[in-house]
Amino acid sequence: MDDTHAGAPRSKEFLASHGGPFYELQRRLKLLHDHALMSGRRAVLFIGIAWGGPFLLGLPQSLSIDTSGGLTYLTDVSVWARFVIAIGAFVLAEQQVEQRLQEELRHVLSAPVIAPSSFAGAADAVNDALRRRNSNVAEIVCLLIAIIAACVVLRHQYVTDKPSWAVMTAPAGNVVTLAGWWSIAVSIPLFWFLVTRGLWRHLVWSLLLRRLSWLELRLVATHPDGKGGIGFLADYPSAYVTSVFGVSCAVAATLAQNLLQETATLTNISILMVVWLVIILGLFAFPLSAFSRPLLELKKVSMARLSAQATQYHRMAERKLTGSNAVAASGTEPEDVTDPTKQYELTRKLSPMLLSHAALLPVSAAALLPFAILASTRVPFKEVLSLVKKLLLL
């Protein structure tokens, strides 16, 4: 089956990074085109807006690396992590994510995994996903969350007793600098908008996969991938390596400034790394776990049938060898049965879990690397390396 089959959904229409008000705004500003996301150019532009704005407004103090009078712009790790690495990673990852998800959907349709009787249901699922992707309400909510995050930062600036490039502290009241105002009005909202928008679009993909899992699927218990023929879906998380690294850098930098200044022990860092890794892997487990139900049912039914056939085959072999069956001898049983042993063993090894360690390894590494760098500045590197290895081997 291909996308042109009558009634089949067209995978080429599902472009995860297209659609929505923000995409349309960028298209009208000619920052991208329908057939070219221009990720590199937009990444440089957004980094320039988020990082360059406060830098220019803070000159010449922005060039200082003397922290005796407070945190300076160039020495603020969270600034580099959020406004350079994270924002750049989010934009650069768009093309890779879009291509991979489209390939996965095309594979589902061309394998063929979906039964012809479910073409209409699959088409409806894709159309619903496109409507969610293009939702104005969803992006407005993302924008509101970004504004709330900026307001929280602004409130913190007025109560903090630590001077920095963003705020000047004084007994009469703190004063937010021009660079600080730019970060609150532009940089922080842009960062949080890209984060929440990316999460929403992954949720759209997740709901699409879960919807497809409830359709009639043409799964094969003895498929060599050990996943019924849909093992390829387990590879999609690797498309998010860049964006996971970006958001992990931002989280690690924030923790470094706010939580680990005086409590940076290997135990505390280990707990944070485990929690963060569970959150990241949970995002990818959510859509893939929906296929456990059909895979478990496939294994249950196939094992029952093959077990029955194995009984018939070995009773037939027993009769041929000894002249009759030792127990419940009967002449009504079939005399020409194929040996199902190989199929039985393959079915027994069928895994109902689509999560692949090979596919999740680069994502896990991207999630842990920023925390490992942070930890190595506070505890021995050898201990950090040992911890990371143990987590990656789980």
Image (cartoon, rainbow, N blue to C red):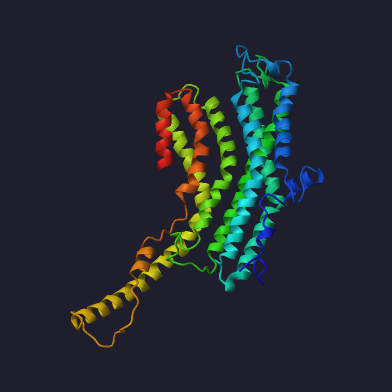
Question: Residue at the location (67% across, 22% down)?
Answer: 166
How many marks the image carries: the answer is: 0
Rendered view: 311 above or below 266? below
From the top left corner, tell me how far across and down residue 226 is, in percent. 43, 60
Q: Nearer the viewer, residue 220 or 373?
A: 220
Q: Quadrant of residue 53?
A: top right
Residue 135 visible in this rendered orientation of the protein: yes
From the top left corner, tell me how far across and down residue 81 is, in percent. 61, 30
Q: Nearer the viewer, residue 266 or 391?
A: 391
Rendered view: 380 above or below 215? above
Question: Residue at the location (67% across, 44% down)?
Answer: 142
The C terminus: image quadrant: top left
Rendered view: 201 above or below 110? above
Q: Is residue 146 left or right of residue 104?
A: right
The N terminus: image quadrant: bottom right
Question: Residue at the location (23% across, 81% down)?
Answer: 320
Rendered view: 138 above or below 178? below
Residue 185 visible in this rendered orientation of the protein: no
From the top left corner, tell me how far across and down residue 354 is, in percent. 47, 55
Question: Residue at the location (68% across, 41% down)?
Answer: 144
- Which residue is outermost to the front? 321
From the top left corner, tell me how far across and down residue 182 is, in percent. 73, 28
